[in-house]
Every structure is written in structure tokens, then in C-alpha cells.
Amino acid sequence: MAEAASYEIPTSVLETLVASGRRLVLDRRGSTVWEVETQQGRYAVKLGYPIKATSEWEAQEWTALAPAREGAILQQLDRANVSYGEWEHGTWNIQPWHQGDSLYDLWHPHRAEGVSSEPDPGEALSCAEAVAALHATGWAHGDVQPAHLIISPEGTALIDLALAHGGDIPAAYDFSYRGCLVHYESPEISRSVLHTGTATPTMEADVYALGASLFISATGLRHVAYPNDASRRDQRRAIVDGPHRPVTVPGVLGKLIEAMLSPDPADRPTSAEACKELSSGR
């Protein structure tokens, strides 16, 4: 049974929101995420708690700190209606709920059998603009992936900033960056994690991750091939040592993805350059 099964939103947090309803959205090792209804609108509530050691997992304390770390970052970015604090098992944050579809879900029709249509460059541009907007503030995201790009008619929201790097973090809530979801790691991030156990998020690595996100969302394939049951170490070795799959996405988007997946960070376009390329190709 998942550790988080008994971890309801603390009463003090619900009272702060004056919640009228709530829905569990995510329940995974180290965190739970809730969508909460209030008279002022919908909010996301994130709870973090430490992962206990098992025969399959090492103990991880940083997961308890992640919500407060993200809350501190969002406040530095002047995001409205964000708060964070501590609870019995770790930390929490409250932030406005972002309605929309993830990049992967939105592009599902392009992955259907027999379909080879080019995804909407405008939607890709919206994702690049969200990354570029964060980069313009001096922050690197550190965990760009399709699930963190939420697309709506109003634009794209880049969510889950708990691993971001670029400003001062309260020491009580800070922790070392140990990489992200490996499917979207750049070679330099994977190499550093393999050699030292940690890395530093960069804007160049974000661009690589955005390219990998566009690739998998358009094709259904990871940008680097490795077995589904490969360990994280083996996944990272494949990213460091192996070439990426051929980019079969048609048009301007495919050419851009190819450039974004360059193994050399210096050869990748910046997020702003990616926006310019997508804008000119529409």
C-alpha cells in the first residue's frame, strides 16, 4: 500500500483555504497533490514527506522539503496566491491550479497508428515560450517534461518548480539536485549524476529536456532507446553513451528538436532562439 494513503491535507491548510471540496490528483512516493475548490477558485495543494528505505528504495529525505522549496521559488518569481509551510511529516505549498492538458496528452492524436501529421507548431511555441519566460528571470527549471507543460487556450503553464535553480533558497528547505526523470535528462546532467551523485540544473539542459519532451509527445518514443526495465544507472549510461533516435517529426519542429538534442550544450539553441525559430516557421 502506498505510504501516502493516510496523508490527508492538514486541517490547518484546509482552514486557510476555506475549502469546499477536494480531489486527490497524485499519490506517489514522497508526495501527494490535491485539487482544492474554494470560493476564490481552484488551488493545488502539495504535501511532501520523506521516503523510508525499503528493499527496493533508498531513504530520501528531500521529498519532504520539495513543496516548501517550490513555494519559496514561486514567491521569488512573484507568483500570486502562493504560500507554504510545515506539517507533521514534512512541508506543503498552496498555489493556483492550472487547468489544461499536458503536452503528452494533447498530442496523443499524432501518435495514433498510421498518423504522421505534424503537431501544431503553435502549441510547441507556447511550450518554448513558457520555458523562455522562466529563463528570462534567471532561473533554470531542472525538471522539464511533458507532464509539466500544461496547455490551455490562454497559453502554457510550466509547473513543478521544486528542483529549479537560480536564486536564494531558504537553507531549511534546500537540497542537492540529483537529476530528474531520466527520460528527459541531458547527457551532461546524466554524466554528472553518474559520477558525483548530483548535478546543477542549467538552461541548456532545460532546452534539451524540452526537445526530448516534444519528441516523445509527437512520436511516443523516448529520445534514447533503452529497455523499459533498465535501472536508472543504465538509463543514464545510455543517454551519455548512445546517440538519440532519429528525429522523424516533420517540418520546422523536427529540425528544431534535432538541434535541441545536441549532445554539446553549446550547440543547442537557447529557449528564446527556439521561440524565434518556431515563430518564423508558422
Image (cartoon, grey):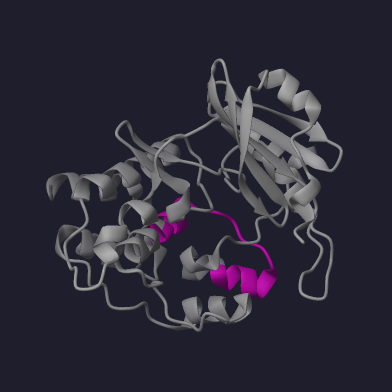
Relative side of 84 to 61, left or right: left
Q: How many marks?
A: 0
Image quarter of the N terminus: bottom right
Tell me the magenta residue range. 190-209
Identity of the residue furthest to the right in this view: 88
Identify which residue is drawn at 18% across, 60% down: 118
Can the viewer see residue 157? Answer: yes
Q: Give whichever of 29, 209 is nearer the camera.
A: 29
Q: What is the magenta segment's predominant secondary structure?
A: helix
Identify which residue is drawn at 55% across, 70% down: 190
Identify which residue is drawn at 43% across, 35% down: 99
Q: Position of residue 191 (x, y in %)?
A: 56, 73
Q: Quadrant of residue 126?
A: top left
Magenta span includes 196 = yes
Identity of the residue furthest to the front in this view: 21
Q: Position of residue 51 (x, y in %)?
A: 79, 58
Magenta span includes 17 = no
Q: Position of residue 158 (x, y in %)?
A: 45, 42
Identify which residue is drawn at 58% across, 26% down: 37
Q: Position of residue 27 (x, y in %)?
A: 66, 51
Residue 100 drawn above or below residue 178:
above
Q: Give whichever of 96, 270 is nearer the camera.
A: 96
Can the viewer see residue 267? Answer: no
